[in-house]
């Protein structure tokens, strides 16, 4: 059973950089899956942030692309999110998740999720 | 970029009733890449349906998905108390590459 666990500071100052890590257990980050970050502002809907493959290939939400970096550490079986120049609008629960794919390798959903971690942007 | 809209915003029903949730895409979506999630307060989303109509592992058969093109539907045949939650549709686009979620439909107790 794959498990994902987010970790990182729960409070970030405005204009600072949000940094989170997602530890993967029960499976290898070097499998054929891509890995995603999703966020949810309090009381609002879900927003996809971006994805990474174990090779380091990434895709980002165009609305966040200029501020987002997702990286992978295969030796630690984890992947990470950095979001720069944060404002109060970046306050949200951040989730990491595993993607699963059809036979051609195209993503069709997110089947395993972490429990989520609340990050508040405030001075 | 494909935009997903969901209706209604809120659906007030009683246990045992049938729930019909709609997801409409701004452009045609391959059925293979349309998924539905359930989210309860304080919990991560849970995958219910993928490929528009395939139930994920462990999902009861009272949940069913249908549709094609731009119109998709999630049906809960008989609402159980644990089904009152928010439901999101999602698709994966090729240009730009990435997931898009709908705004969600809240199913609450009437």
Image: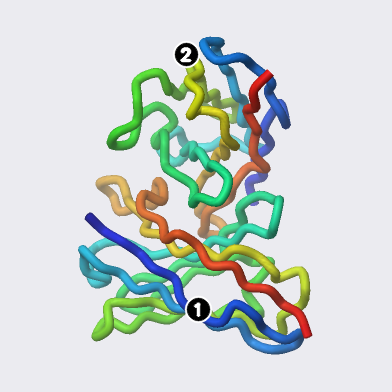
Q: Nearer the viewer, residue B73 or B81?
A: B81
Q: Residue at x 26, y 58 (%)?
A: A2
Residue A70 x/y as whole percent:
48, 78
Give the residue pinned by disc 2: B77
Q: Residue furthest bottom?
A: A16
Look at the image and tell me in which quarter the N terminus of chain A lies: bottom left
- Would residue A9 appear left or right of A2 to someone viewing this image? right
User: What chain does mark 1 sit on?
Assistant: A
- Residue A34 vs A108, above or below: the answer is below
Quarter of the rendering containing residue B24: top right
- Residue A18 vs A39, above or below: the answer is below
Q: Which residue is drawn at 64% across and 39% down?
A: B104
Q: Do labels 1 and 2 share a chain?
A: no
Label 1 secondary element: strand
Residue B66 x/y as whole percent:
47, 22
Q: What is the number of the mark on residue A32?
A: none
User: What chain does mark 2 sit on?
Assistant: B
Q: Residue at x 70, y 69 (%)?
A: A91
* CA distance separating discs 1 and 2: 40 Å
- Residue A54 vs B15, above or below: the answer is below
Q: How crowded is mark 1: few (under 14 residues within 10 Å), some or many (20 or more)?
A: many
Q: Residue at x 44, y 31 (%)?
A: B52
Give the residue pinned by disc 1: A20
Quarter of the rendering containing residue B31: top left
Look at the image and tell me in which quarter the C terminus of chain A lies: bottom right
- Would residue A58 appear left or right of A78 to someone viewing this image? right
Q: Which of A8 and A76 is in front in this view?
A: A8
- Would residue B101 appear left or right of B56 to someone viewing this image? right
Residue B86 x/y as whole percent:
60, 37
Residue B76 x/y as whole percent:
49, 19
């Amino acid at each position: 059973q794959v498990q994902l666990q987010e970790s990182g500071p729960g409070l970030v100052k405005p204009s600072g950089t949000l940094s989170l890590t997602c530890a993967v257990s029960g499976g290898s980050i070097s499998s054929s899956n891509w890995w995603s970050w999703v966020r949810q502002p309090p009381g609002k809907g879900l927003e996809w942030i971006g994805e990474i493959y174990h090779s380091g290939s990434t895709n980002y939400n165009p609305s966040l692309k200029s501020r987002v970096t997702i990286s992978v550490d295969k030796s630690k079986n984890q992947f990470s999110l950095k979001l720069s120049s944060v404002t109060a609008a970046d306050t949200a629960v951040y989730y990491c998740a595993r993607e699963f794919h059809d036979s051609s390798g195209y993503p069709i959903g997110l089947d395993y999720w972490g429990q989520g971690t609340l990050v508040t942007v405030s001075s | 970029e494909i935009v997903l809209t969901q209706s209604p915003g809120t659906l007030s029903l009683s246990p045992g009733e049938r729930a019909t949730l709609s997801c409409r895409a701004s452009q045609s979506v391959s059925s293979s890449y349309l998924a539905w999630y359930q989210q309860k307060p304080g919990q991560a989303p849970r995958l219910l349906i993928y490929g528009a109509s395939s139930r994920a592992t462990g999902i009861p058969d009272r949940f069913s998905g249908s549709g094609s093109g731009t119109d998709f539907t999630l049906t809960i045949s008989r609402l159980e108390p644990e089904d009152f939650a928010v439901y999101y549709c999602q698709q994966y686009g090729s240009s730009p590459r990435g997931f898009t979620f709908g705004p969600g439909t809240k199913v609450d107790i009437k």
